[in-house]
Image (cartoon, rainbow, N blue to C red):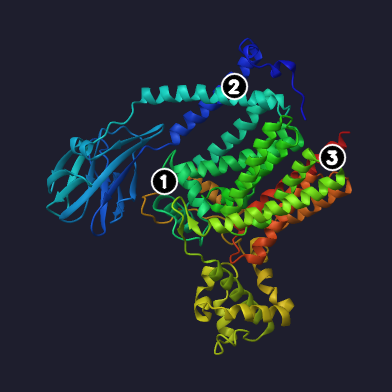
Amino acid sequence: MIEISKQDKVSGLGTLLDIKGWVSYLRILAVVSMLLASFSMTFTDSLVIYAHKNKPDVLQVFFPINGTYSEENSQRSALTENKEHGINIPLPRTPVAHIRIDPANEAGELVINKIELKHLFGIETFMSNDLLARSKPLQMIDKLEVTPAGLLIHSTGNDPAFEFQLKRPSVASQLTKIGIISILLSLVMFLGAKILAGEKMLAARERVYVLAIPLLASLAVSALFYPGFMSYDTLHALRGARNGVTDSMWPPMVSYVWRAVDMVSFNPAAMHFSQVFLLLLSVFFVVFIFTKKISYAMAFLFIYLSIPVVLGTVAVIWKDVLMAAFFMAGFAVIVAMRVVVNRWVFIFLSLFAVFLIFLGVCSRHNAITGAVPLLFYFALIVCSRVLKKPSNIWLGAILLGSVLTGAVYVTKTQLDNYSLPNFEKLNNSTAVFMQSVRVLDVASASLCVGSNLFAEMAPNLSLAEINTGYDPRHINLSAGLLNRIGYDDRINKIWLSVALHHPICFLNNKFQITKYMVGANEGDQFLITSPSVDSNEYGYSLAKSSLRDSAVAYIVHASKLPFFKPWFLYLISIASFVYLIRISRLTAGYLTIYLSAVFYFAGLVIFGNAADARLLFYTTTGFSIITFISVFEFIKRKHK
């Protein structure tokens, strides 16, 4: 690793007198201040209104832009009987001293339990007495009354409205808080950097670059696609975070992570930024550690984000990006463990690495296959630290890796069965999911064989009907066929029989899925990105942006170029892997990234029920790193 000067190792009182140390601290302070200032510019204050009514209705909030209330400057949200469900209303960036709330669309009663004003560094809660003091009826409201349940509002018509006085923090107080937090946070980072310097991991200037460059890139991505594209999967995770997880059809962990992010900001851009920053920070650190050059890591980041299927995927708030971010972060921590000297730091990093990998496994149902090489590499690093004989190291790594893999998988499957934090039993749809995959396998095999292999379940189903109903691109596109076949245990017997009697045709569905995922199909790649925010009850939408539209146009058009197709990138990666073997430069770290990407690919093909080009995001990330590393090794050999 890169050596550091003796001055960088100074701590305690000596640090206070060290000019170079102060310069390093000021650099960190500048980066942190820039981060917080940028975050404050993208952060949107919001109101969370906890209200309920005995039947569904609509609540609408109006903002006085230029002193006038209008439909264009308002937010609507569904009102339900659930008193625990908060209605999130983003506030405009322009200062407003008051808002108008239309609590219903008909005469009757409703109760507002409380209203929370969420700003950058705090939450102000208004209970029933505060609500009464700040509220002024405007029309069709004849009574505002404090009750044990909250503020009771009695409306007399179909357009009730009252004005609510806000007291948002002043700009001066916000800037003061940013300054204080910047100083404290940068001090913690500076002291942490000194510890890492003692471990001889990074030089002072490099520590700043490793943080600042991915940070700026993440801010750019978040600003470009603000607030982040949101598909059905995204909104399902968001509803689980805010209303409670009710099923495990999609991984509950994504909702739990989002719930934690919501503690900082209800703006979905915060979740988008969090997953992108963790991902880019991790891959930047990994490439830098392998190449020992900031310029190479910067070059990789630029090339990586220019790949259409990568940029199109990071534009979306999506579980696949979150999973890749956790896996890459876990791998980055394992790489850092190799050079750590302090025992307690090593133990902390060990626990942190396993925790990150565990979060990655929980973020996608088939992620365990990609985690296996990571966990075994972790086991190898740990055993190399505590054991001496090579035979004991390898045996220990195999045993520890096996135990960790089993423990992570069992814990993940159990976690999917219960909602947190109340541990209520969830509806588990694993059996239905596997049966749907097997229906598609048998349908594709039927087309390959030329006869209906569903005879036991659907004897009257014709081959033409199977051909019409079967679509390997996505399970939703085959919904008609799945509904016709049905879901029961007989499909498991049929699936096994097809595997035994038609082994070649049995793999036809896997081949079709692979073809679409790697972009080897005719025409455009399937679902290269999802450039929209689906209709939702939170009022989230995309504002007009010519820059974003240009980026989407680039993603769509560049994805049609052969050298940007995943299959081409993967062939280059295979050649790069072979080259590393040939020149004897295939390290355990390189092998781990490559195998993790391959294993994840295999898991998607075996258990997948969709063929989006985005699904192989983690594989594309791993393969891209290997390709770049092989180019680096080639350049290094040329300059020897």
The image position of residue 175, as x and y in percent, is 41, 24
Residue 388 is marked as 3
| SS label for mark 1 | loop
Rendered position, 241 above or below 448: above
Residue linked to disc 2? 27
Q: Say which label, 1 or 3, has the lower sequence index.
A: 3
Q: Quadrant of the N terminus?
A: top right
Residue linked to disc 1? 543
The image position of residue 407, as x and y in percent, is 64, 54
Of the residues shown, which amino acid type is indicated by label 1?
Answer: Ala
| Structural distance between the alpha carbons of marks 1 and 3 | 60 Å
From the viewer's side, name the closer residue of 271 and 296. 271
Q: Say which label, 2 or 1, has the lower sequence index.
A: 2
Are there few (<14), some (14-19), or many (20+) residues within 10 Å of tag 2?
A: some
Q: Residue at x 67, y 49 (%)?
A: 621
Instruction: Report if residue 184 is visible in the image.
Output: yes
Q: Residue at x 58, y 84 (%)?
A: 464
The image position of residue 384, as x and y in percent, is 79, 41
Are there few (<14), some (14-19), or many (20+) residues within 10 Å of tag 1?
A: few
Q: Residue at x 31, y 52 (%)?
A: 77
Of the residues shown, which amino acid type is indicated by label 3?
Answer: Lys
Rendered position, 45 above or below 208: below
